[in-house]
């Protein structure tokens, strides 16, 4: 059985902390999403977002990756 750990995460949309689960598959999907965005492999993003959501990713966790200012063209 996969263990999950609750942790408080900062939600930048409404400036409050939210309790979310640290599920290993969710975290891996979010990491792969971040890497796909950095490599501009946008065709992989919908599937990775779906997996992350399926395993409990909060909308703000996904949105923060999509709106990361470090990915903006300079």
Image: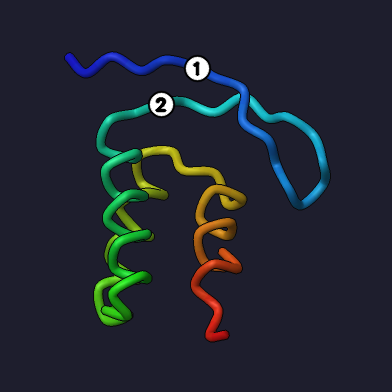
Looking at the image, what colour scheme do you see? rainbow
**In the picture, which quadrant includes the N terminus?**
top left
Q: Earlier in the sequence, mark 1 or mark 2?
A: 1
Drawn side of residue 57 relative to residue 15, left or right? left
Residue 22 shows which numbered tag? 2
Label 2 crowding class (10 Å Cα cut-off): few <14, some 14-19, many 20+?
A: some
Q: Which residue extends farthest left?
A: 1
Give the Cα distance between marks 1 and 2.
Answer: 6 Å
Rendering coords of residue 39 (x, y %): 28, 74
Q: Which residue extends farthest bottom?
A: 73
Is residue 17 shown above or below 42?
A: above
Q: Residue at x 50, y 59 (%)?
A: 65
Rendering coords of residue 71 (x, y %): 49, 72
Q: Residue at x 41, y 49 (%)?
A: 53
In terms of depth relative to the viewer, which is nearer, 74 or 1?
74
In terms of depth relative to the viewer, which is nearer, 65 or 22?
65
Which secondary structure lies at badge 2?
strand
Q: Residue at x 54, y 19 (%)?
A: 7
User: Is the C-beta separation of discs 1 and 2 under 8 Å?
Assistant: yes
Drawn side of residue 22 relative to residue 44, left or right? right
Residue 47 figure quarter: bottom left
Is residue 4 shown above or below 9?
A: above
Rendering coords of residue 6 (x, y %): 50, 17
Is residue 74 shown above or below 6?
A: below
Is residue 61 shown above or below 8?
A: below
Residue 26 shows which numbered tag? none
Which secondary structure lies at badge 1?
strand
**In the picture, which quadrant includes the C terminus?**
bottom right
Drawn side of residue 44 relative to residue 68, left or right? left
Q: Residue at x 27, y 30 (%)?
A: 24
Residue 6 shows which numbered tag? 1
Label 1 crowding class (10 Å Cα cut-off): few <14, some 14-19, many 20+?
A: few
């Amino acid at each position: 059985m996969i263990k999950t750990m609750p942790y408080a995460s900062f939600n930048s949309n409404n400036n409050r902390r939210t309790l979310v689960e640290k599920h290993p598959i969710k975290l891996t999907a979010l990491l792969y999403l971040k890497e796909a965005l950095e490599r501009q492999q946008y065709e992989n993003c919908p599937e990775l977002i779906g997996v992350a959501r399926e395993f409990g990713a909060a909308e703000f966790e996904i949105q923060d990756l999509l709106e990361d200012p470090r990915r903006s063209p300079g």
